[in-house]
C-alpha cells in the first residue's frame, strides 16, 4: 500500500511476490512465530494496511478464526482462495477511511518505507483514525526496518558499496518524497501524534549467516536471500526516477553489493523497530 507508483512497481511480478512472502517469514521467525507484538486477546476485527501478498492477514485469519481480517493495498495481488474470515480491498492509507466508528481491535502497518509521503502526517492521521475507528483499548502497531548498516566489531567500515547503496536509497527516497523512516524517529512521531504508553521493541537482524547463534544464523540466511533477490525491485525505480541513473549503471553497481551481502567476514546487521500503543489519551 501507499501512494505513487513505487510500491506498485515492487509488487509487479511473481518473483517479487515470493520475496515479500520470504520477508514475512523472516519477521515471523524473528518474533518466535508471533504475528504481532501488541497483546491481543480474542480480537474481532483487524485491519492490515499495506497487506502486499496478504500473507500476514491470511495467517492472522487462521490464528484467530473468529476474527474478521481486512487487508488493504493499492495492488490487487492477493490470492482468491483465502479463509472465509479474511477479505482484501484496494485502498490508500493516506485517503479518508470509510470504516465504522469503534470498529477495529488492531490496526497493523508493516514495511511501508518508500510508500508514505509524510510519515508524521500519516501517524497523526492514524491517531485521529484510531480514536475514531478503533474500539477502546484497540491497538495500532507499526513495524519498519531501518536500512542503516551497523556492526558491533567495526567490520561495517569494509562494506563500502553496500553502505553507499543505503546512502543512495535514503537520498533517492527523500528526492522522490517517499522518505525511509529511521529507527530513532518512529516512537517520537507516534508519541507526538498523541499516543500514550507506546511500547517499542528493537530487534537486530543480520544481513547474512555470519552469527554463531543458530536462530540468528537462519535469520541472516533468509535475509541475505531477501536482499539479494530484491535489489533490483528495491532500487531501479528510485534510482532511475530520483537519481537519474541509467539502467546500465545500476546493473554494474548491484553485483558489488551482492558480493558484500554474502561476505560473512562483514558482521552486518540492521534494526527492525516494532512500535505499538493500545491506550487513548485521557482527553479522548
Image: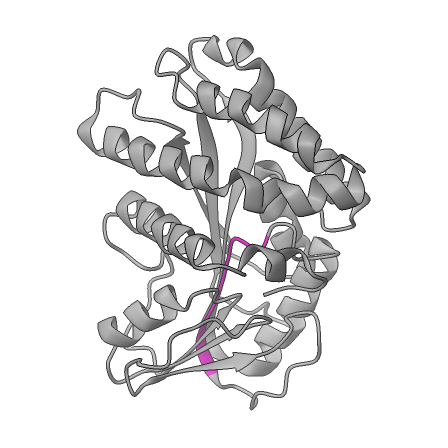
Q: Is residue 250 above or below residue 121?
A: above
Q: Is residue 282 depicted above or below 256 in this figure?
A: below
Residue 21 placement (x, y as % from top left):
36, 56
Looking at the image, can residue 284 be seen? Answer: no
- Residue at (74, 60) in percent of width and height: 121
Residue visible at 24% across and 34% down in the picture: 218
Magenta-span inclusion, residue 111: yes
User: From where the camera sits, is residue 228 visible?
Assistant: yes
User: Eyeballing the image, is 148 above or below 123?
Assistant: above
**Magenta-highlighted residues:** 104-112
Q: Where is residue 25 in the image (x, y as percent from the top left)?
A: 31, 51
Q: Residue furthest bottom?
A: 100
Residue 137 colored magenta?
no
- Image coordinates for residue 220, horizontal then vertical, percent: 33, 31
Choose between 71 and 193: the one closer to the eye. 71
Seen at 31% across and 20% down, the residue is 210
Q: Which of 152 and 115 is in front in this view?
A: 115
Asked where in the image residue 227 lies, by quadrant, the reply is top left
Q: Residue at x 65, y 61 (%)?
A: 123
Question: Looking at the image, which residue sits at the far left?
Answer: 214
Observer-nearest of 160 and 57: 160
What type of secondary structure mainly makes up the magenta span? strand
Quadrant where the image shows the N terminus? bottom right
Residue 253: image x %, image y %?
61, 25
Image-based side of 210 in relation to 178, left or right: left
The colour scheme used to paint the residues is one colour
Residue 266: quarter of image: top left
Left or right, 219 with reference to 247:
left
Q: In which quarter of the image is residue 215?
A: top left
Q: In which quarter of the image is the C terminus?
A: bottom right
Amino acid at each position: 500500500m501507499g501512494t505513487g507508483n513505487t510500491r506498485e512497481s515492487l509488487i509487479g511480478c511473481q518473483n517479487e511476490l515470493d520475496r515479500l512472502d520470504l520477508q514475512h517469514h523472516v519477521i515471523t521467525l524473528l518474533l518466535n512465530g508471533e504475528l504481532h507484538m501488541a497483546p491481543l486477546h480474542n480480537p474481532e476485527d483487524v485491519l492490515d494496511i499495506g497487506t502486499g501478498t496478504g500473507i500476514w492477514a491470511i495467517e492472522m485469519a487462521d490464528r484467530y478464526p473468529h476474527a474478521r481480517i481486512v487487508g488493504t493495498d493499492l495492488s490487487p495481488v492477493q490470492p482468491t482462495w483465502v479463509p472465509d474470515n479474511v477479505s482484501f480491498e484496494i485502498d490508500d492509507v493516506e485517503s479518508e477511511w470509510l470504516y465504522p466508528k469503534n470498529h477495529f481491535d488492531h490496526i497493523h502497518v508493516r514495511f511501508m518505507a518508500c510508500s508514505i509521503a509524510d510519515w508524521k502526517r500519516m501517524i497523526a492521521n492514524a491517531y485521529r483514525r484510531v480514536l475514531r475507528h478503533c474500539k477502546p483499548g484497540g491497538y495500532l502497531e507499526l513495524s519498519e526496518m531501518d536500512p542503516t548498516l551497523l556492526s558491533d566489531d567495526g567490520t561495517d567500515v569494509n562494506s563500502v558499496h553496500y553502505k553507499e547503496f543505503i546512502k543512495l536509497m535514503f537520498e533517492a527516497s527523500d528526492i522522490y518524497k517517499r522518505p525511509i523512516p529511521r529507527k530513532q524517529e518512529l516512537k517520537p512521531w507516534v508519541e507526538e501524534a498523541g499516543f500514550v504508553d507506546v511500547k517499542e521493541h528493537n530487534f537486530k537482524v543480520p544481513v547474512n549467516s555470519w552469527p554463531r547463534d543458530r536462530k540468528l544464523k537462519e535469520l541472516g540466511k533468509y535475509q541475505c536471500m531477501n536482499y539479494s533477490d530484491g535489489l533490483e525491485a528495491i532500487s531501479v525505480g528510485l534510482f532511475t526516477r530520483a537519481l537519474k541513473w541509467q539502467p546500465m549503471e545500476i546493473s554494474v553497481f548491484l553485483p558489488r553489493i551482492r558480493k558484500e551481502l554474502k561476505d560473512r567476514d562483514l558482521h552486518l546487521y540492521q534494526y527492525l523497530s516494532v512500535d505499538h500503543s493500545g491506550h487513548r489519551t485521557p482527553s479522548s
